[in-house]
Image (tube, rainbow, N blue to C red):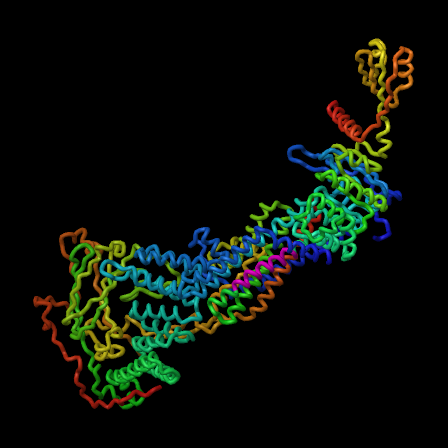
Amino acid sequence: MRRKNTKTTLLGVLALAFVGQFAVSQGYLLGFWRKNYSPGGIVANNLDPSQLALSLFGFREFLAGMLWVRADSFFDQGNYDAVLPIIRLCTILDPKQIDVYATGMWHIGYNFTDEEQRSDRRYIPSALALGKEGARQNPNTYEMFFETGWMWYHKVDDDYGQAVKWFEEAAKREDILPARRNLLWSAYQKAGRPDESLNYLYDLYDRAKGRLKDDQQFGNRQQYDTIENNLDTMLVRMVQRGWVAQHSEEGKKNNWYANGAYDTKPPFDVGFSAKVTVLSDRVLRVEGTWNVLPVGTRIRIVLRDADYPQAKMAELDWDSSDSVNLDPPRNLTFMQDQLFVRNRHFNRKIDMSKDPTMYPFIAKNYLVEFYYNPRSAPPHIQDKFGFNGEGFTDKNFLRTDVRETIQFKPAKFDDHKFPIEFEQIPLKDIPQRVMYTTLSLTQEQIRRKGEWSDKTPVVKTVNYVESTDSKDKDDVIYIPNLRVSGTGDAKAPAEAPKK
Amino acid sequence: MGAILSISTTTVGEAIRRRVLLVILMIGVLLISIVPALSVLSARSDLTTTISSMLFVLRIVSVLIAIVLTVYMIPNEIERRTIYTILSKPVQRWQFLVGKYLGAVLALGLMIGLMAGVMLILFYFFKHPPMERMLDLLRQAILYFIEVSLLAAVAIFFSTFVTPLVNFFLSAGVWGVGSLLNPLYDSFANNQGSAPIIRGMAKFVTSILPNFSNYDVKNPIINPGVTIQNETTYYLGTAGYGLLYITILIIAGILIFDRREV
Amino acid sequence: MASEPPQGGVLPLGAAIETRQLTKTYKSRALGKINVVDHLDLQVEEGEIFGFLGPNGAGKTTTIKMLLGIIYPSAGEGYVLGREIGDMDVHRVISYLPERPYYYEHMTGMEILKFYGALFGINDKDKFQRLLEKVNLAGDATKTISQYSKGMQQRIGLAQSLLNDPKLLFLDEPTGGLDPIAHTEIRDLILQFRDEGRTVFISSHELSEVERICDRVAIINKGKIERQGRLEDLLRGGRIEVIADGLNQGFADTVRAPESTVSFHNGRLIVDMSEEGDVNGLLDGIRDAKGQIISVVPRRRRLEDLFIETISEKKSGGEAA
């Protein structure tokens, strides 16, 4: 009897404890764990069973460390394809290994090239996705924000608003190294926002001065000098390029820009023209004119499927992917290169025949895009073109609808007050003046098949003028002096007002 | 209470003399000791690698010790007939079982304490970490102790009705699945594409099996800088969860053991 | 110990152990159901040394385990010191020494007593010391069990079994595997227990030992009690050997009977017959035939004979069936 009672009591306690553990586990622990301790990004189908077991038992970091050592040997052998999955694995196993994210992103973005050292840009959305993931996983350190910004700034070298966004985020992290802050001022400038660039330079200047005051070491002195120098140059350029005249209150009131003599006035016509000749299967010759004498112009050329899904004008939608896909669309073609201008001409052979996997040319129709963004121009050319291309024009191919100036503003914040979503604000009053035009080619033309097997396909812009002159001569086009002498009173203030 | 205490202290005395356990323990201490040298694996994430490897060794060795110690505890008593002399005294079976379990927990505490001590000392001398990280490590070690206490309860429960060998794999299996629960649940819950039935299953399994993954909180320890709100409450929560689940297992074990022919 | 008798029946005073139809059934895949202990009726009086005899595998240990509540009966009932078996209060006043017991080897003799003492709530160092002296281990109290000989281990076992001054002791093969000197020591201790008024229940297959010390025995075979009673009663019914000379074959043939063995050689007759047989008639016959009686020797039965008789009877009976 007593035994039976005891048993009933025990069963009761057991049931209560069971309900209790259920409540504690489901009601509290699970949620808390997922929020704070979850490794995140566990993607089971990327791991073989033993790796999965090891990783899920909580030994992920250990495994990731071992794998990363292995990846190193593949790097040494140049076996880049083998490195890719390891990078992915390591980041899945240990999303806190910033080295892997940074190296992996750089690897995906830069290392896959064709025989002529052109990057396979079909990978770039994935490289950026890896950067975004790395930043999400490591929101407390500046590194992945900086690295992702760098990818926009240097590799994409366009859409500088994105570089600004990432560099701004990096600069918010307390652990950022002083020198890593510097790039942001340049990014602001390339994004068409020299006023913010100037303000940021003042901020950098104050910081450098403060550090130098605390510690007279060489590095601090050097940093201070660099920033001071940059600040001086920036002020001079803002005046010279007429930015102050155009944008300061006083300048606007007194019509300084209209009346003054500025380097950027009047806009300079670059006179673009181009001809594309298909020399043989997948080999093109691209030649044409660009009426800028000083060395330093690189015109972007893109050859891609006419209906490439993520394509925008003269670029892909680089930010299109949030998931890292190591297998780029192998049935699509996207070639991007630069045409280097010498003596106001460009003439370049583009040989894609050695890399049929990168340039499969499966689709029927192709687009050749020519694109020039004065914001990417080197400073000595920008002195004429202005920060925003206000001193730049092309009587045939000037476009202001190709790129928007976008400012990203944090819209949603995570628990640590870091933004996780951004609002895109188009700055309509800062239009991007670019040169853009396209030519069309068919698959048969590029592959020299069908009717084109014994006929040389040639496509050209309507204004292209065949010249019999030697291309080495520099008398093809009249060369105006880049420094146009001003007509009005140059009364711009010596220093731009600090906001 | 005197009987339980007496049985548990005797169990500790026996456990710390078991050669196989001492060998595993020695290997654990040895592995922890060579970890500081492993930091070459990743020069920049030196601390990360060191902490994660040390905790890796601590956890796996503790789990192994817990299982090996516990699966043989009851069967050995029966085989060597010590249980007859004990049960012929005024000792209830539940007292015997609870005493044995507490002895196992005490022995585990001693062994994990030793390994954690070595870990903390080595970590301090080789890496000169801030005190906060030392405390983080200590906290994780304590959570691992609760984890293996729960695991010992699982093994004791099974040992009331299966043979040691079967128990070894059963307990290891339960621990294996139990330490996957949160990550699996997490990945199903995050992946909106997974079928509702699978997500339901994940939820069901998570609420039935002992959830060992609750005790794996080393992410922020390895990657500090994240401030976690109310972490103490979580630690208390996991301890409470552990106690509740241990209660379940021990009561179930008592109910089975009470009718068991020994 | 509570004075109120437990539910389930009260035993007549004086019975230390009583079982009624106590049965333990095991299921085996190969052999089906086996009654390891088969409707056992056992009665052990208080203050006696009771021998529980049987070959290996007869069900002795199973019975003891049931009486101790370590395993549960499949059927029937049993009472120990007036309580239903399994009653925890009874465990305070009984004690058990298993066959070839194992003690935690890392402990010393003294620690063993402390450990088992703690299970009763006893922490009396003087008592432990007295018990060690009693089993002649006082000098080895600080040695660990691993350093003890088998005999010493058995004696420390006896010491621990005396911790609670038990009214009833269960000793399972107490002399098993011991040398003759150890035998004697253990035997003396057991006799001492009886003198102290304790009931001793000895399970054994070493019959000479049991014969020397037991008051009553039960013989169990294949789970069933074959004989049970006072040793004197069971051994009653010995044999008588008659030897005579100067007789012829014809006479020898007349004395042959089913219960007798008769041998005749060169005029010498040897008759081995039951005590209950007609000894006087035989002697008269020899005298009438002019034979010379050389010796008449009564031979008392030994427990071994009884045991073998019982077991072999059972065997042949089983075969016939």
Q: Position of residue A425 (x, y in %)?
A: 37, 75
Classify residue C73 as left or right of residue A327.
Answer: right
Classify residue A499 as left or right of residue B184.
Answer: left
Instruction: Identify which residue, A154 or A288, lies in the foreground.
Output: A154
Main secondary structure found in the magenta portion: helix
Classify residue A323 as left or right of residue B28.
Answer: left
Q: Position of residue A66 (x, y in %)?
A: 41, 57
Residue B145: which quarter of the image? Answer: bottom right
Instruction: Identify which residue, C204 or A455, lies in the foreground.
Output: C204
Where is the C terminus of chain A found, in terms of image quarters?
bottom left
Q: Determine the residue positioned at 42% across, 54% down.
A: A46
Q: Is B78 within the magenta?
A: no
Work out whether C199 lies above or below A322. Answer: above
Classify residue A488 as left or right of residue A76.
Answer: left
Instruction: Identify which residue, A176 or C144, lies in the foreground.
Output: C144
Instruction: Identify which residue, A119 or C166, lies in the foreground.
Output: C166
**Across the whole image, how many numbered discs are drawn on residues?**
0
Residue B163: which quarter of the image? Answer: top right
Residue A214: which quarter of the image? Answer: bottom left
Q: Magenta residues, as a range?
A: B102-119
Q: Determine the residue positioned at 38% across, 85% down.
A: A213
Q: Can residue C25 be spotted in the picture?
A: yes
Q: Position of residue A359 (x, y in %)?
A: 25, 56
Q: Can residue A1 be spotted in the picture?
A: no
Q: Determine the residue positioned at 60% across, 46% down.
A: B164
Q: Position of residue C180 (x, y in %)?
A: 74, 38
